[in-house]
Amino acid sequence: MELLRFTTAGSVDDGKSTLIGRLLYDSKSIFEDQYAAIEESSKRKGDATVNLALLTDGLRAEREQGITIDVAYRYFATPKRKFIIADTPGHIQYTRNMVTGASTANLAIILIDARLGIQEQTHRHTIIATLLGIPHIVFCVNKMDLVDYAEDVFENIKADIEAFASKLNVIDIRFVPISALKGDNVVHPSENMPWYQGSTLLYLLETIHIGSDHNHIDCRFPVQGVIRPQSTEYHDFRGYAGRIASGIFKPGDEVVVLPSGFTSTIRAIHTFNGEIEEAFAPMSVTITLTDDIDVSRGDMIVRENNQPEVSQDIDLMVCWLHEKPLQPNGKYAIRHTTNDARCLIKEVRYKLDINTLHRHEEDKVIGMNDIARVKIRSTKPLLYDRYARNRETGSLILIDEGTNETVGAAMIL
Amino acid sequence: MQKTYSLTHLQELEAEAIYVLREVAAQFERVGLLFSGGKDSIVVSHLARKAFFPAKLPFPLVHIDTGHNFPETIAFRDSYCRKIGAELIVGSVQESIDQGKVVEEKGYNASRNVLQTVTLLDTIEREKFDAVIGGARRDEEKARAKERFFSHRDEFGQWDPKNQRPELWNIFNGRKQFGEHFRVFPISNWTEMDVWQYILAENIELPSLYFSHQREVFARDGVLMAASDYIPRRDSEKVEKKVVRFRTIGDITCTGAVESAADSVEKIIAEVAASRTTERGTRADDKRSEAAMEDRKKDGYF
Ligand SMILES: Nc1nc2c(ncn2[C@@H]2O[C@H](COP(=O)(O)OP(=O)(O)O)[C@@H](O)[C@H]2O)c(=O)[nH]1
């Protein structure tokens, strides 16, 4: 059984919570005590029907304000797949939350209210999903029950999105007309929309091909740590622990260790359950080399004929996550793969309008939820690939050195 | 036929947890692994053995002992530590009570569960831990759904749900000021079902309490509690012998049993698959109020 990680996006009231509640409920992922709790809450509030949206309602602060404020993770499984939902609520801190949820997702569901059609937010959600390199986007046109399940409403919205998406680099887009409230085309095919021949949302989630979402071409092994048992049984064992970021590694492969540039050969790939014949992303393994060379955390093991970029001057697309704006010429700590460094913000090139893709070159004040193109210089060379090619080696975070808070999420261009 | 390079969901979750455990070892000075003797902490310690193999576990197991244990849990804890060669550190709630740091609750629903928080924070301070690893999962409870892998605690050990660092990609920020610490949850993304399937796949040994057995129990608020000197009973609460098992293992005063004939991991999986209540539904500590868990977390609970 495979694992699919997806994120959900929509403006407030598009029906996101109802949709997630519906997926959990109709796929029988809700327990009696959970259902009883929301049934009681619904009654207390005087709702006529059980409000499925309450299932995804999290912390007390939110319950009091009646809104969600942070990324929450939900889990469900069908006999075909297991799912992790990064549920990102739509309001003020929206961009920051969606970027966070999107960073680990293979798929994004973007909700559109059938009555309203494409909104500014729809552009924003699509642009963020694309920027974060999510390979699959499913547009759900929701509340079809409120437009008499009319085919032309769905088709018009679909055409609008296709026209807009053609300007973006979207790999795979799908459309499903649904009613989250009534359940049409969520888990069960709709009897109200015989004109729709496509899959239900759940069927899409269960079958969409995700096997190629990992990069299996560029071999990148960021070293997390060195394993030296210092026991008699493993006297000379010196293994490099890490998670394969991309590519496929095999014993006998000739490799280069960066940044030193020393070459060696993979002696073996170790796991607790024994040595294995090949390792690929996202496996966690321990690699031993035939030569006794100096390798430590932050180094990267790669193939000689396919090496990452190595540079101190790097162009980034940054999403700013913190209330305190980005400081031009400011210094930040960087965490990139298993490496730490510091950097200086050399230049803010432009702020990206994420509703229109317009570049504001004169506006250089980058506050929370803004996305901007910046140039940095790091204290030591980073070993990276472009984000569009490799989400693992192409992403980094910026950390405020005073407060230690994570203030920026960056994709390397 | 073209070869496909994909992992099963259990392999992917395992790889993620091992990655997180290795990050903890790399980013912190002194790490403890919270070990309750329950299945989640057993799975985490199993994953930690895998993460650092062939080296031995680089951190001690830490048991916060309320003194109100099932004897089976303590027997298991001690033999398990011997078997895997792990160092064991015990933080004692009884000691915190004797030192007057906490006051024992009174009455029928008295529990030392809440007191554990003080003992835990004291143990963290005494041992100078800058990170403690726990087996909490996001699917357990609503307040946990937003918990991070690396969860920041201030110098009072408190958790501020409004001020948690965003976690992007697989990059974890464990930087901290002096006196602060982190709680790290490597199996955040696992569900109860995943844990059981993994226990089966890896053939992991568990305390006997998880499996069906005969026990003297009584019903309270719809939950079966073990008859024990630690729990005062009302006259109306009749003790009966029943065939039960425990779905979670914690302090004896707040861990409920379910009637079950499941005496193997396979049968438990079948039961979990068919079951219609969450495992926390048998824990008295969460029932106190809908927001109970969130309040305890803010104060520094696990
Ligand atoms: N008629 C109709 N109402 C819906 C549908 N989906 C959601 N709603 C209603 O729209 C409102 C907002 O839904 P909610 O799920 O809370 O939206 P969120 O803010 O996106 O999470 C609620 O009153 C829902 O009952 C739908 O498919 N049809």
Image: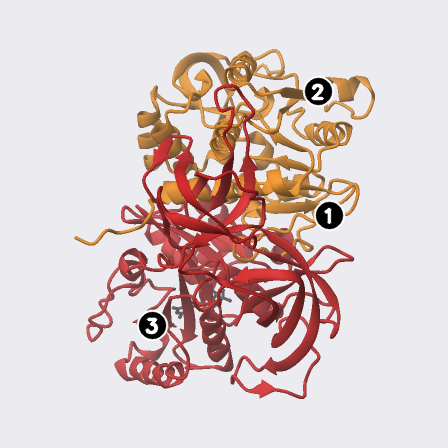
Chain colours: A red, B orange
Mark 1 CB within 8 Å of ligand 1: no
Where in the figure is residue A109, as x and y percent of width and height?
Answer: 40, 66
Q: The residue marked by circle 2 belongs to what chain?
A: B
Would you name the residue on which mark 1 appears? Answer: B176
How far apart marks 2 and 1 lie (CA) works out to 27 Å
Where in the figure is residue A96, as x and y percent of width and height?
Answer: 59, 66
Q: CB of mark 2 within 8 Å of CB of mark 1? A: no
User: Which mark is on residue A173?
Assistant: 3
Badge 2 density bin: few <14, some 14–19, many ≥20, Cα 10 Å: some
Q: Residue B94 occupies which quadrant of the picture?
A: top right
Asked if residue A157 is positioned above or below residue A260 in the image, the reply reads: below
**Camera-side residue of A103 and B233:** A103
Asked if residue A315 is positioned above or below residue B74 in the image, the reply reads: below
How far apart marks 3 and 2 lie (CA) works out to 56 Å
Would you name the residue on which mark 2 appears? Answer: B92
**Camera-side residue of A177 and B237:** A177
Which amino acid is tagged 1?
Lys
